[in-house]
Amino acid sequence: MNQPLRILIADDELVARKRLARLLAAFPDTTVCGEAADGEAVLEAVRAGGVDLVLLDIHMPGLSGMDALALLPEDGPHVVLVTAHADHAVDAFEHGAVDYVLKPVEASRLQKALERVRNRLVVKVPESGKGSAVEQLARPLTRLPIPTRQGIVLVDPGTISHATLEDELVTVFTSQGDYLTDFTLQELVDRLPTEGFYRVHRRALLNLAHVTRLEPLETGGYLARTTRGHTVEVSRQSARELRRMLGLRRGTEEEPPA
């Protein structure tokens, strides 16, 4: 049995907290470790420790969900934003959240968000002699159908390095070539494997298996360089999430080699 995912429910409405608690009770390997009705209580609970994930409402008295997210420590828990407004979805990724869930929360959508969190809690490093991270990622996956203006292209998800949004159109970059698609970035997120792919900017999705270098920016974010030489901007909040996932402290990547 997996170690239970310790979840803090943060919402200023009691009814909303009870609904989330009821939904979580039906999932195996999850436990509600506490509740919070405002941003200050969230920060206090996180400082006390024992929290793996915060289900964080955006609109709360005092500190908003976005404010509390910005104040969480880099080595703190993962965050899934819970909101009643779809227009906050883009901001969720920009602020470093793993995912967002729309109210009223549905069990199937909540389960998918929990799966994303679990995949980030376990960082798998390829063992010597067993192939690269790209090879290991590609083997168990099926083909992803990408609708393009030239027809449907069947792509191995493991070959996708990143996808970017430019002028309301998404381009998917792969080892074999680049494809302009009618998919939105969110539709790609929903269809791709939860492991390895990350929404690193409101206009970018990145596969870490294809990243060769993360160059720090003055904004606090990164410029990710891929194996094909492309560059992808990583937002400041997403950079914080990457540092935590990779076990880095802020500034570590800027230190010269000994």
Image: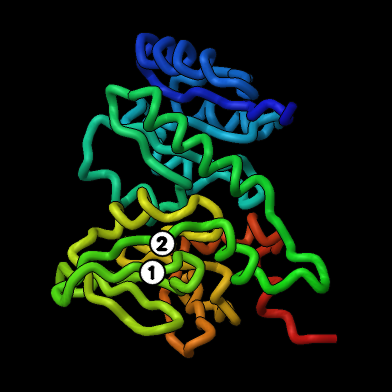
Is residue 177 positioned above or below 206 on the image? below
Q: Residue at x 45, y 19 (%)?
A: 37
Residue beneath disc 1: 155
Q: Residue at x 77, y 69 (%)?
A: 130
Is residue 256 positioned above or below 152 on the image? below
| 113 displayed left or right of 212 | left
The C terminus - image quarter: bottom right
Residue 218 on image: x %, y %: 48, 77
Observer able to see residue 186: yes
- Judged from the image, the secondary structure of the residue bearing numbered disc 1 is strand
Q: How many marks?
A: 2
| 58 displayed left or right of 196 | left
Is residue 167 positioned above or below 100 on the image? below
Disc 1 crowd, CA 10 A, few/some/many (<14, 14-19, 20+): some
Is residue 93 positioned above or below 88 on the image? below
Asked if marks 2 and 1 touch (Cβ < 8 Å), the reply is: yes
Q: What is the spatial separation of the Cα atoms under label 2 and label 1, in whole angstroms? A: 5 Å
**Which kind of residue does numbered mark 2 sit on?**
Arg
Among the 4 quarters of the image, the one containing residue 170? bottom left
- Between 105 and 135, the one lying in front of the other is 135
Among the 4 quarters of the image, the one containing residue 15? top left
- Judged from the image, the secondary structure of the residue bearing numbered disc 2 is loop
- Between 164 and 241, the one lying in front of the other is 164
Q: Kindly identify which numbered label has been placed on residue 143.
A: 2
Q: Residue furthest right?
A: 258
| 232 displayed left or right of 252 | left
**Which kind of residue does numbered mark 1 sit on?**
Val
